[in-house]
Amino acid sequence: QVLYALVIRDLDSDGFDANGYASVDVNGRQVFRETSFNVDSAIIFFVPDTCHEEQSILVLEMKLDDNPSDISWDILNMDENDLVVDRDTTVAYTRLANQSLYYDKCLDPGDYILTIYDTVGDGIQDPGYFKLLLDGREIRTGGGSDGFTTAQAFYFTVREPIFTESC
């Protein structure tokens, strides 16, 4: 996996013109689109290796809050009791308050747990949120003022793909 950061700066603090925008597409999927900002806008995204046809793509989209350094997450493969992702934001994302983060991971079929942690105990505060997508389908959302406090876990299953022959 490769980590990328895109930072847009506007020295005049007047943002885009009426029809202006910035967009980033990775492997044919839009991971970022910004139509308005005043001074700075930033996004962090990971680009996974190409998934094998039997794998599914999991995307964690997160809008960080004022304290991004207290958020971390991991993904556990329950079938193999293997931690397949372990991300700590305490150092790398300190300067990304209220910015977006996208994390993609190719996963083999099986049962998984995604756990998001907050060391301070205030969760991801408004306007922050997270979305979890599996093969482009939203399977969980959370955060904001009605979200978790110290940790929240989500169970999900990656199914074997169904192949059909075409005539």
Image (spheres, rainbow, N blue to C red):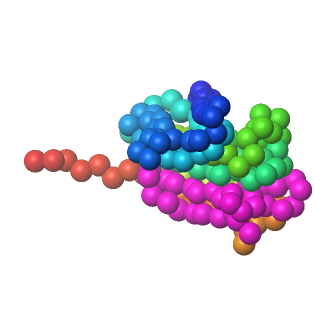
Picture quarter with the N terminus? top right
Looking at the image, the residue that sits furthest to the left is 167
* Residue 140 position by quadrant: bottom right
Horizontally, is 67 left or right of 106 in the view? right
Looking at the image, the residue that sits furthest to the right is 120
- Spot occupied by residue 9 in the image (x, y as percentages of width and height): 63, 32
Residue at 58% x, 57% y is 131
In depth, the one of 157 and 146 nearer the eye is 146
Q: Is 119 part of what is drawn in magenta?
A: yes
* Residue 111 position by quadrant: bottom right
**Is residue 139 visible to the viewer in this orientation of the structure?**
yes
- Spot occupied by residue 152 in the image (x, y as percentages of width and height): 74, 62
Q: Which residues are magenta?
A: 116-145
In depth, the one of 51 and 72 nearer the eye is 72
Residue at 38% x, 50% y is 161
- Spot occupied by residue 95 in the image (x, y as percentages of width and height): 78, 38
